[in-house]
Image (spheres, grey):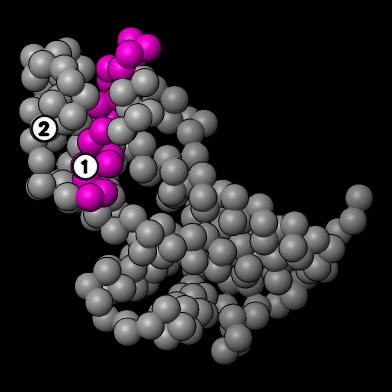
Amino acid sequence: MTDAKAAYHHGDLRNALVETATELVRTSGAEGFSLRDAARTLGVSANATYRHFDSKSALLTAVASAEADKLARRMRRKMADAERALEGRDDAEVAIECFKAIGRAYVAFATEEPELFRLMHGPSGLCQMRHEPRADASDHPTADRILGEALDRLVSGGVIPPQSRIDGEIRAWTVVHGFASLVLDGAFATVASRAEVLEGLLDFALRGLGASQAGAKGPRRQRQRP
């Protein structure tokens, strides 16, 4: 809790509470502590917390929002890594690998931060966040926006037909989120088996979106060089 206490002592109690609650969720789960516990950990009164959060649910929503940002940044980095690794390759191949990279990033986040992942998709998470739009939402990276970009690239790269782009987010997300949830429920005995199944499911998702061949390779389009 050192960083959280440092933030508090620098006058940033709100962020200190979010950091403290994040660690409490990570170690005890969303139901394993109270708003008073978070205040006690920081050494402040419970009344002080109400200046920033009127309930534990509001604090958990702030934690979920911060973790959603981290997930989106991870997905963006993995997409950029895929682009660099395949620089100069054709658009279809790059688009496919970018799509798979963000799927892997999503599952990796779930397995590394299971309690925070569950919080993000619980009643204090995405469902509540959708009712509290952000002031900077127009240019703020989100997981679904990054997925949308990846799907657009699959269309522009000739991997999937334009008509398959409709509702593509929910179809792709259902596959990857469902797999992540099964992993957290203990459905796979080893990391190796989990990785193998995930790769197959990513190809399955691509075929479901209209990629033409078993290897998820649609019509290949050569990248135009400037």
- The residue closer to the viewer here, 64 or 127, is 64
What label sits on residue 24 in the rendered view?
1
Furthest residue in direction bottom, as rendered = 214
Q: Quadrant of residue 17?
A: top left
Residue 153 locus on image (x, y percent): 63, 59
Instruction: Label 1, secondary structure: give it.
Output: helix
Residue 224 locus on image (x, y percent): 86, 59
**Mark found first going from the N terminus, 1 or 2:** 1
Residue visible at 47% across and 78% down in the picture: 195
Q: Is residue 156 left or right of residue 149?
A: right
Tell me, yes or no, whether the two marked residues, 1 and 2, touch with CB atoms within 8 Å: yes
Q: Amino acid at mark 1?
A: Leu
What label sits on residue 37 in the rendered view?
2
Can residue 204 be seen here? no
Q: Which residues are magenta?
A: 8-27
Q: Residues within 10 Å of mark 2 (few under 14, many from 20)?
A: some
Instruction: Label 2, secondary structure: give it.
Output: helix
Residue visible at 16% across and 17% down in the picture: 44
Above or below: residue 66 compared with residue 55: below
Can residue 104 be seen here? yes
